[in-house]
Image: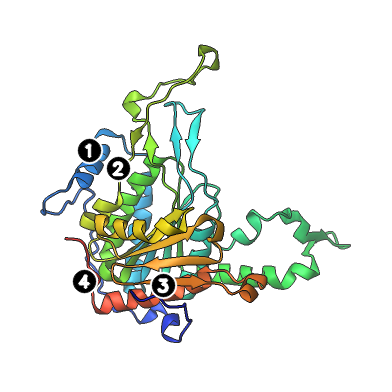
Amino acid sequence: MDRRSHRRSQASATTASSAVVSAPDDTMPAENGNSTSSIVSAVSLSEEYFNTTNPPACVQENAAKTHAFVLFHLRQRRRIVLITSGGTTVPLENQTVRFIDNFSAGTRGATSAEYFIDAGYAVIFMHRTFSLQPYTRHYSHSKNCFLDFLQANDQGGIAVVPEYLSQIKNVLLKYQEVRKNNLLLMIDFVTVTDYLFLLRRITQIVALARESAMYYLAAAVSDFYIPASKMVEHKIQSGDGALSLQLDQVPKIIKPLVKEWATKGLIVSFKLETDPTILEDKARRALIRYGHQIVIGNILSTRKSQVHLITQNDAMEITLSPEEVKQDVEIEAKIIPELVQRHTEWIRNIGDWGVGN
């Protein structure tokens, strides 16, 4: 097994602008287009979920925006990455007051989005409402109130405090350039139902980019939920005594994503553990079970300074040195160039990484 220290090379910094992308037909892909191959149990369970759950109202509008965004960038011959970020909620009532939350600030996804854009990608950022977002993340969840960066002047105007001016200006200029070039599409979700329906529909559209698409699944998705048919209508009353809940398992959506919705794209999932001795084994099991290409493994206590990039053929550690940690280097600055290079290899040799049968 190839274990090697991460090295940033000229090759790993390859931008995505050189991708060979074929412009697709302008027709939006059908929502329920399934492959004719035999359907495994995980796919069947996901279809059962979609067939028995009412789709959220947000799906159609976001599908139209995504379709326009994807076609625009395919005509520009630009690679596209779908990033999912943040946690999902599980409502306990139809008129929701109480819910179970899968907490995630969305740091990995929001940070990665900026580095993907720097590498030449167009980014579809599918995120939990009010979680961290690209560019605004530098200030929206700061320990300092954003107003601390501003001051009133004698002329009755408002200015940035001088010590923060350079930093804010750099972020602002990048953000404005991204807006100008239509490089970032924001789509938000709250519940696990929102997430699953949006992921299916958005993935089907991004699949127009074929092998020039990447799917970077960094969201913290709920493992259990209450089907609408079993959910009470109104607020659960505390006066009724102890509360017992029986939750159904959320279908493993990555299986149909690999088998049916995004059969040509490079798919990256994440695995978080607390025990380092089981991380690689669990990551490899996921690769075999779902048939995708890359798992990025994290250990809870070291996730900001070390990750493991695992494929069916190799594994490598990506780490920050003590000096880089002191300098506030973000580990995504190393993860994303490595993925860009892997994506370049994927485009050249699609299928060589053991796409599931």
Helix, strand or loop at label 3? It is strand
Spatial CA distance of label 2 from label 3 is: 30 Å
Which of marks 4 and 1 precedes in the sequence?
1
State yes or no: discs 4 and 3 in contact (Cβ < 8 Å).
no
Q: Nearer the viewer, residue 159 or 288?
A: 288
| Residue ID at (38%, 50%) | 62
Q: How many marks?
A: 4
Extreme residue in the top direction = 240
Q: Amino acid at mark 4?
A: Gly
Q: Nearer the viewer, mark 1 or mark 4?
A: 4
Q: Which residue is mark 2?
A: 251
Q: Which mark is residue 316?
A: 3
* CB under 8 Å between discs 1 and 4: no
Q: Earlier in the sequence, mark 2 or mark 3?
A: 2
Check disc 4 and report the residue beneath it.
351
Q: CA distance from mark 1 to mark 4?
A: 29 Å
> Can residue 333 be seen here?
yes
Q: Image check: 342 left or right of 38?
A: right
* Disc 4 to disc 2, C-alpha distance: 26 Å
At mark 4, the secondary structure is loop
43 lies left or right of 278:
left
Is 221 above or below relative to 287? Answer: above
Label 1 crowd (10 A; few <14 / some 14-19 / many >=20) = few
Q: Which residue bears the numbered disc 1?
A: 48
**In this view, 120 is above or below 105:** below
Q: Position of residue 319 (x, y in %)?
A: 52, 71
